[in-house]
Amino acid sequence: MERIKLKMFRNNLENFPQFELPEGYTIRMFRQGDEHNWAKVETAAGEFKDTDEALKRFNKEFGSNIEEMKYRCLFIENKSGEVIGTTTAWFGHLEGIGENLGRIHFVAIKPEYQGKKLSKPLLSTALNKMIELGHEQVYLTTQTTSYPAINMYLSYGFEPYDTEGQDQKGWMMMEEVLDRKLDI
């Protein structure tokens, strides 16, 4: 499948699904040194070719706001305390909407833990964190190759965001792959 970048937007943080983690898993916040756990999870999930590349991206995205990570970056741990998933309730700018929006950033679960009902509790927790941090709207970026995640985001009330029609091909592909009519 062709990899096309896509954006999604949710214009409020009301009435989104709430899911609890299965037994044996916990969610915790970022602690000093967790950039290495973040890099391992993101690399395992295929976002980066190796942890060095992931750490460079971590530093570019979050390095100047490392204190914010303690309030915004979430990790899922298994019962052994191993970090197996992450996302960040970050902030950013979406053209046509404005500044200081909430941003769901870098959602990842290690492949051996995918399909274990962990993504929805992680997303629910991140959106609750957005409310706690004062955000009223939220967006995310994704790609067509992450169509299972796109389907989940749609079920959470995120909508395709394409102000200039640049992403039409990708969203049409998603309609077909997901067998779901999208408001494009």
Image (cartoon, helix red, strand yellow):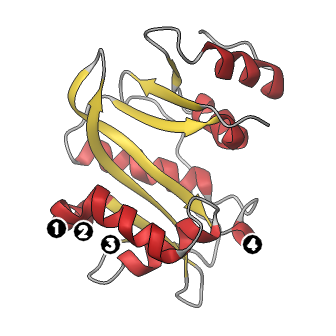
Residue type at mark 2 is: Lys
* Residue name at image x 20 percent, y 67 percent: 66
Label placed on residue 30 = 3
Q: Quadrant of the C terminus?
A: top right
Q: Position of residue 51 (x, y in %)?
A: 50, 76
Question: Which of marks 3 and 2 precedes in the sequence?
Answer: 3
Q: Is residue 27 visible?
A: no
Marks 2 and 3 in Cβ contact (< 8 Å)? yes
Residue 82 in which image quadrant = bottom right
Left or right of 155 in this view: 10: left
Give the distance between the C-alpha atoms of the residues marked 4 and 2, in whole angstroms: 26 Å
Marks 3 and 4 in Cβ contact (< 8 Å)? no
* Residue name at image x 46 percent, y 76 percent: 52
Residue type at mark 4 is: Glu
Q: Secondary structure at mark 3?
A: loop
Question: Which of marks 4 and 3 precedes in the sequence?
Answer: 3
* Residue name at image x 26 percent, y 82 percent: 32
Residue type at mark 1 is: Glu
Count residues near mark 4 (Cα–Cα under 10 Å), then give few for <14, some for 14-19, many for 20+.
Answer: few
Residue type at mark 3 is: Phe
Q: Secondary structure at mark 1?
A: helix
Give the distance between the C-alpha atoms of the residues marked 2 and 3, in whole angstroms: 5 Å
Label placed on residue 5 = none
Q: Which residue is mark 4?
A: 112
Question: Which of marks 2 and 4 precedes in the sequence?
Answer: 2
Left or right of 47 in this view: 171: right
* Residue name at image x 30 percent, y 49 percent: 90
Q: Which residue is mark 2?
A: 70
Residue 167 in which image quadrant = top right
